[in-house]
Image: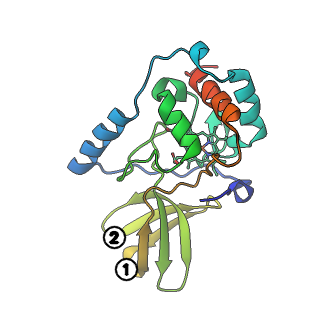
Amino acid sequence: MRQRSSILSDQRAAKRGLWQITGDDVRDIAAYVWSLGRSDVSVAELPGDPDEGAALYASMDCSSCHIIDGAGGTMGPVLTNIGRLRGIDHLREALLDPGATLPENPVASAAGSIYLLVSVQTRDGRRITGTRVNEDTFTIQVRDEEDMFHSIRKDDIVSLQKRFGESLMPSYADTVNEGGINALVAYLATLRGGS
Ligand code: HEC
């Protein structure tokens, strides 16, 4: 997906739901957590400068979607602790290829929210694209790209597309050079909770 922050300006408080976790989900959660590859690399050993990364973070409007230390938007996961939760390779991949960092069957992230992108077409001709907040046998709840919450009855749906591997987060592979990515990764690695 391409840049969406322009339409995310007026964000309201997130309405988040909780998943009912099945046996399959538990397996996926285990695999996902395992794949996150935490590492104990110290920030000083990284090629990028965390201060430069902090400045980039501020200038690139990452905070329209992410919260650090209580400030920011709710479209993406909270990053306050991300340096403790995630390894360096995962952080880099999250910037270069968002969506690839999501498992096939996405589960709760650090923030306890799920970021599976879905497109729903309803019988009455509405098309809603956003992140799945919750789903059961009869209904699906979706937060759309303008942060509007929709609860849709499955009886009213003509097509439901689950867009695994895609993300609302733009890729920075073409817009930020290697030095900038290194700086952002170093900054993210310093985010270990508290202020
Ligand atoms: C349009 C909203 C949006 C913008 C802008 C955005 N992100 Fe994201 N970000 C997301 C979403 C949604 C996810 C979760 C899905 C995914 O991993 O692709 C995410 C995931 C991440 C993750 C992985 C989190 C985890 O739990 O592993 C990191 C790190 C991250 N973003 C950093 C950034 C940085 C740094 C910037 C600015 C350079 C940025 N994001 C800009 C929406 C956004």
**Disc 1 secondary structure class:** helix
Q: Find ligand 1 in the image and state its quadrant.
A: top right
The quadrant of the rendering that contains the C terminus is top right
Mark 2 surroundings within 10 Å by alpha-carbon count, few (fewer than 14), some (14 through 19), many (20 or more): few
Q: Residue at x 68, y 42 (%)?
A: 62
Q: CA distance from mark 1 to mark 2?
A: 7 Å
Question: Residue reaching furthest front?
Answer: 178
Residue 22 appears in the picture as rendered: no
Q: Amino acid at mark 1?
A: Asp
Residue 56 appears in the picture as rendered: yes
Q: Residue 66, located in which quarter of the rendered image?
A: top right
Q: Residue at x 40, y 34 (%)?
A: 36
Q: Residue 72, located in which quarter of the rendered image?
A: top right
Which residue in the structure is indicated by mark 2?
A: 138
Q: Position of residue 129 (x, y in %)?
A: 55, 67
Q: Position of residue 100 (x, y in %)?
A: 46, 49
Residue 155 disc label = 1
